[in-house]
Image (tube, helix red, strand yellow):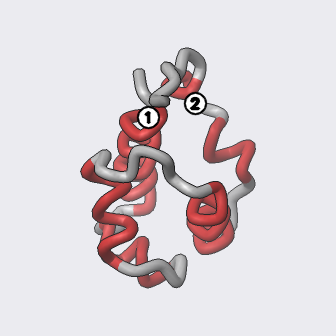
Amino acid sequence: MKLSEAISIKIQKICSTYNITPNKLANICCLTQSTVQNLVAGKSKNPKLLTIIRICEGLNITLKDFFDDEIFYKIERED
C-alpha cells in the first residue's frame, strides 16, 4: 500500500471514530478543507508531516497514535 492510500484510510477511520466529516476535521485542525479533502482522496502523493502533526494536535492525539495502525506496516515508496 502506498503512503497516500494509508493516510487516506487513517483519516477516514479518524473521522468515523470521532463522528466528524473531513471538513469538520479541517476546521478543528486549522487546515484548509482542500488540504484534508486531498488527503482523503489520496491526491497528496507526499503528505507533509506538519499536516499530520496538525491533525494530531487538533484531535489531541500523538503521532504514535496516528501511525500505530497496521495499514502503515507495509508502505510502498512512491518515488
In the image, which disc is placed on residue 69? Answer: 2
- Seen at 74% across and 54% down, the residue is 62
Amino acid identity at mark 2: Asp
Residue type (three-letter) at the residue carrying disc 1: Ala
x and y percentages locating residue 58 in the rendered image: 60, 74
Gap between marks 1 and 2, in whole Å? 9 Å
- Residue situated in front as seen by the camera: 78 or 54: 78
| First reached walking from the N terminus: tag 1 or tag 2 | 1
Rendered view: 32 above or below 20: below
Q: Position of residue 33 (x, y in %)?
A: 33, 77
Q: Is residue 28 left or right of residue 40?
A: right
Mark on residue 78?
Answer: none
Left or right: 73 in relation to 43:
right
Element at badge 1?
helix
Quarter assignment of residue 15: bottom left
Give the residue displayed 29% in from the left and 64% down from the top: 37
Instruction: Identify the residue at horizontal 64%, vertical 62% (top origin).
Output: 56
User: To which residue does mark 1 refer?
Assistant: 6
Number of residues whose C-alpha sits closer than 10 Å to that of mark 1, classed few (under 14), some (14–19) or many (20 or more): many
Q: As drawn, is 73 to the left or to the right of 4?
A: right
Determine the secondary structure under disc 2: loop
| Label 2 packing within 10 angstroms: few (<14), some (14-19), many (20+) | few
Find residue 18 and report its image quarter.
bottom left
**Front position among marks 1 and 2:** 1
**Is there CB contact under 8 Å for labels 1 and 2?**
yes
User: 21 or 51, which is in the foreground?
Assistant: 51
